Image (spheres, coloured by chain):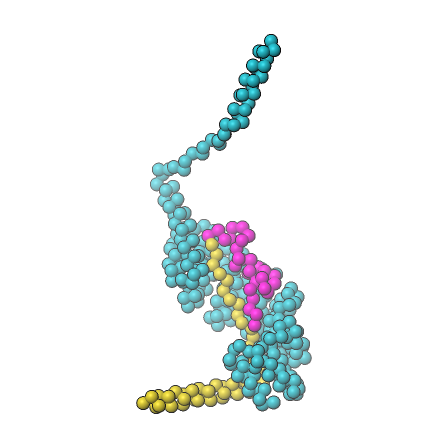
Amino acid sequence: MFARAAIASLLVLAAASGAVSAQTYARPSAAPRTTDRNALVAQAREREIHERFMRGVGLEERGDWNGAEAEFQRLLVLDPAEPKGSTVRYDLALAEAHLGRDDVAARLLEDALHRDPRFAAAAANLVAIQLRRGDLTAARAAADRFVATAPGAALARYARGLTALRAGDLPTARADFRALIDADPAYAVAHYDLALIELRAGRDDTARTELEAALTLSPAYARARFALGTVLMRDGRRADARIAFDRCARDAEDPVLRALAIDLRDRL
Amino acid sequence: MVRMRDLRRWVIAAVLALGACTGAAFGADLILGDPGTLVPSAAPGLLGPITELGRTGWNCAPERAARARTASDAGLPQN
């Protein structure tokens, strides 16, 4: 009786250990096979979209804009669904812009934003391209759209503030650069642009305060130093202005700015 | 022959330098007369390429830069 029980126990133990040591596999999924012509065409199309995207982006990262343009032109014909469709237009616009075809790039970005109105990077690049084209009306429309898409974005405020400043819309420019400073007080450039707005509005004292803030944040900011020199000179503070122009002449990397600063310093 | 070429180079350099000085002086007068001619900061640069799946998820650098709240995260010009 005892022997039978022992044998039975051994058999159960052997069966259990066998079950543990054996590997188990999930049931294999069915191989993706089809002989349907439309399905095969769709698979080939998806594969081509994937390959051309990889090659196109790789070429853009290496600065081969002609090669990238060819890849994205083909992708435009393949016309993938969103968000790839608007991304193709964005990437193609980037290549066209670097090839000097800003008009084409602007149209592609408009199309990308028509497909995906919340595509913030496309909105940003459209403002940059319209500014480069010198079309302030189109740049302003693009900048308004960018701010509406991303009202808290520093780039949106900067782009619209700069567009408004160039177009002479001082209230909008002031509001945007003020919003930029409120969000990021350490950004010296926003203080400089705000100073230019105040100078154009005839508020020299406020402008000087903003320029001093910019130079406190970035002491080697030559353009701000130059602007401060002109404000001081207009205020009759010739000795201070001379010091500002002298410092600007030493800090400026731009040869034109350096020549201007030297000329003004030597007159004082 | 070589001397003539050197002389011509010196004359051209002198004319260019004179032109630059005159231009700088003229520009300085213009700026002092009207501070509205001071140049605003640089236009924003173009954001970079986006991959096939870049906008699916959170790892899209251009989209993040376009929506960033600070100047450094947005890659704004520094002068």
Q: Position of residue A102 (x, y in %)?
A: 44, 67
What is the residue that sits farthest to the left in this orientation? B1
Is B77 magenta? The answer is yes
Q: Main secondary structure of the magenta part?
A: loop
Q: Colour of chain A?
A: cyan
Report how many numbered discs are placed on residues in the image. 0
Task: Say if residue A147 shows up in the picture.
Answer: no
In reply to whether residue A220 is colored magenta, the answer given is no
Q: Position of residue A75 (x, y in %)?
A: 40, 54
Name the quadrant of the N terminus of chain A: top right
In terms of depth relative to the viewer, which is nearer, A130 or A191?
A191
**Magenta region:** B52-79
Vertical side of A42 occupied by A177: above or below: below
For the C terminus of chain A, the image quarter is bottom right
Asked if residue A212 can be seen in this view, the reply is yes
> Residue A107 occupies which quadrant of the picture?
bottom left
* B10 in relation to A192, above or below: below
Residue drawn at x 55%, y 87% as measured from the top left: A263
Q: Position of residue A260 (x, y in %)?
A: 54, 84
**Of the pair B77 and A251, the residue shown nearer to us:** A251
Q: Residue at x 50, y 55 (%)?
A: A116
Chain B appears what colour?
Answer: yellow
Question: Residue at the spot x=47%, y=89% of the render?
Answer: B18
Camera-side residue: B4 or A122? B4
